Image (spheres, grey):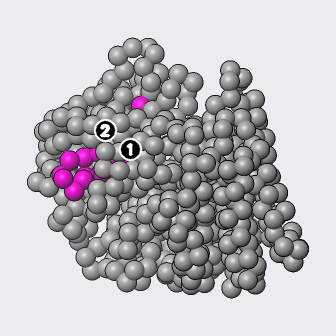
Amino acid sequence: MKHTLTLFLLITTLLANKTDYTIIVKQPFNAALFDITENYDRTLTAVGFSKEYKKNITTSRSYTNAFEYLRNSSGNFGAKMHILTVNDKAKIILSKQAKLSHFNKAIAVVKTPSNGYFIGGYTLDGSLLLLKLDAKANIIFTKMFGTKNYDRMSNLILLSDGGVLAVGSSATSRSTDDDMFNTGLGNTDIFLTRFSKDGRVLWSKKYGTMHDDNGIDAAEAADGSIVVISTTSYNKNRNVTLMRITQNGNRIWLKHYKKTTKNESIVIPKKIIRLKDNNFIVVLTQYNEMQREYIRFIKFDLYKNILMDKEIFTTYPSQINDIKEYSDGRFIAVGYVKDSYNTDGLAMILDSNLALLNQEHYGNDNYDVFNAVTIMHNSQAAVAGVYTDDNSQETHMWITKLNPDASMVQLSTATSSFYDKLCLLFQKEIAAKQIVIKKDLSILLIAKSLYFLAGESKLTQEQKNLLKSFNKKLIPFLYTHRKVIQAVEIDGHTSSEWGSVDFTQKYLNNEKLSLQRSFETLSYLFTNARKKEQQWLTKVTKGSGYSYAKEISIKGKEDKKLSRRVSFKIVLKNK
C-alpha cells in the first residue's frame, strides 16, 4: 500500500494577526494541533489533524463489523494527519495532509538529527502509526503497528540513540499463542513499542494489572532507562502508576499512588519530563470535592524518592497539558482554564521550586486550549492547540508564540519601536517602580497608592495625583502616534472575595466592580485630556472589566491587594 503526504490547499481562511504572533487555520469540520517543535532553520512545525469530505460515495456492500466499515470508508472522508510549518513572520510555508487509507490523527512530532521528523499517531479503527519524514515533510517510511485489538497512542518520545518510543494503551489480548502480550490482565494495558532510528521495531511490550491500565507518557533517564507514567482505573477510582524500565523494556521498579479514602481526590497524570538535574517532574490534574480540576506537580528522582509535591490552586478549574524547563530552571506550562461557559488557553510561568510567577489566559469567548509547548532558541515559547470562533461549533488549528513572562510575542517592528519609546518616556516611573511596561504594550500600575481598597472604585486623591502625572505624558504621546494606534484599553480588575455570597453573585458583583474601576479611571483621564485628544480618544478608547479572572498570585496564592487594580494596553494597527 502506498502512503503519501500530499500538499493540502487551505480551503478557508488563515488568520495571522500582524501585531500578535498567532496563526489560526480555519477549515470545514473540526481541526486541531497536538504537538510542536522548532526546526534547525528557526521555523516551527506542528502536527494534528484536519478533516476532508468527498461527496457521492456509494457502495453496495453490507457490513456487520463497525471497524471493517471504518477501514473501507475512511479513505473517503474523516480525520487526516496534518503538518504545518510556519516562519517567524507568522506565515505558513508548508501545509500537508497525509493521504492514508484510514481515519488517522497525529499526536506527536520529534526532530531527527537529519532535520526531518518522526510523527506518531493512530488510526481511528485501532492501529498505531509511525511516520518518518524528511525536512520538507516527504515520507521516508510509514509503519502501521500494534495488536489485533484496539490500540491508541498517547505520545512519542525521542531517545538518545536516535530512535523513538511509542507510549499508549491496547485492549488485552487473550490469545495463548501471543507470548509477547500475555501479561495483560485487564480490559486495557500499557503498550510500549521501541523503534530504531531507521524504523525497525526493537521490542513491543504490554504492562498491566487486572484493571484498566493506560500508558500516558514517558521520559528517558541519563542512564538510558525509561520512566513511564500511566493510570489504573477500576470502579470509580483512577490511580497513578510510575514505572521504570530498562532499555530493553524490563521492569526495574513500579510505584502505585492509590486512593486511601473515599474522600480522596481523583488524580490523572498528564505529562512527565526529565529535568536538567536528571530528576523528573510529573504534571497531574487533581479534582477537588466539587470535581473541579486543579494542578499538581510531583518531583522525584530515579529511585522513586519524592523530592517535591506542589499543588497550585486557581480561581477557575485549570489543567496543564505540557511543560518545559528553561535553561535558568524556570518552567513554562500550558493547558486550559475554564468557567461554566468559556475555556481559554492557559500559560503559566513557574520558578525552579514550581511556585507560580505569572499566568495568562488566551482565546475567545468559546473553547480554546493549549495542547503543547516548546522553548525556542531565543527563550520564546511556541504553543500549539485549538481555537474556536464565537458562535461556532468547529475547532481550528492554532499556533502562537509567548515571551518568557507568558505575554504574547509581537510581530510588528513598529511594536518594538513603540515599546522602546514608551520605556524611554516613563523611565523615571519605571525606575521608581510605579509602573511596568510589557513588550505586548501592556502598562501595569504598580505603585502602592494605585491599588484599590476592597469594594472601592472611586479614585482617592493620591490615585488622582499619580494618574494626572501619568496622563500628562501618556495621552499626548498616544495622540502624537495616533496614526498607528488601533485601540487604547483600560481594564479593571478585582480580587476574588465578596463576603459570603454564592459563586454566581460573587462573580457578578466583582465584574460590576471591575467595570466601575475601569470607568472611573477612563473618566478621569478623558476629563483631563485636551479637546482634540478627547475627540480622538472617543474613537479608540475601550473600557473593560475582568472581575477576578486575572488575579495576581504570589507563590501560588492570590495577593488580594495587588489584584485590585487597573491596567492599560495599547493595540497597534495591522500593517
Quadrant of the image occupied by residue 196: bottom left
Mark seen at residue 298: 2
**Picture layout, residue 435 above or below residue 86:** above
The stretch of residues the image draws in magenta is 267-281
| Amino acid at the residue labelled 1 | Ala
Q: Residue at x 34, y 55 (%)?
A: 330
The N terminus lies in quadrant: bottom left
Q: CA distance from mark 2 to mark 1?
A: 13 Å
Q: Position of residue 30 (x, y in %)?
A: 64, 59
* Residue 86 shown left or right of residue 518 in the figure: left
Queried whether the magenta region covers residue 280, the answer comes back as: yes
Q: In the current view of this chain or complex, which residue is farthest to the left?
A: 223
Q: Position of residue 356 (x, y in %)?
A: 43, 46
Q: Position of residue 93 (x, y in %)?
A: 52, 84
Q: Residue at x 44, y 24 (%)?
A: 265
Which residue position holds label 1? 355
Quadrant of the image occupied by residue 555: top left
Q: Foreground residue, 292 or 211? A: 292
* Residue 103 shown left or right of residue 463 in the figure: left
At mark 1, the secondary structure is: loop
Say few, some or many: other residues with alpha carbon within 10 Å of mark 1 (under 14 / 14 to 19 / 20 or more): some
| Dominant secondary-structure state across the stretch colored magenta | strand
| Amino acid at the residue labelled 2 | Ile
**Picture layout, residue 336 above or below residue 88:** above
Does any portion of residue 149 appear in the rendered image? no
At mark 2, the secondary structure is: strand
Q: Foreground residue, 485 or 242? A: 485
Q: Are marks 2 and 1 in contact (CB under 8 Å)?
A: no
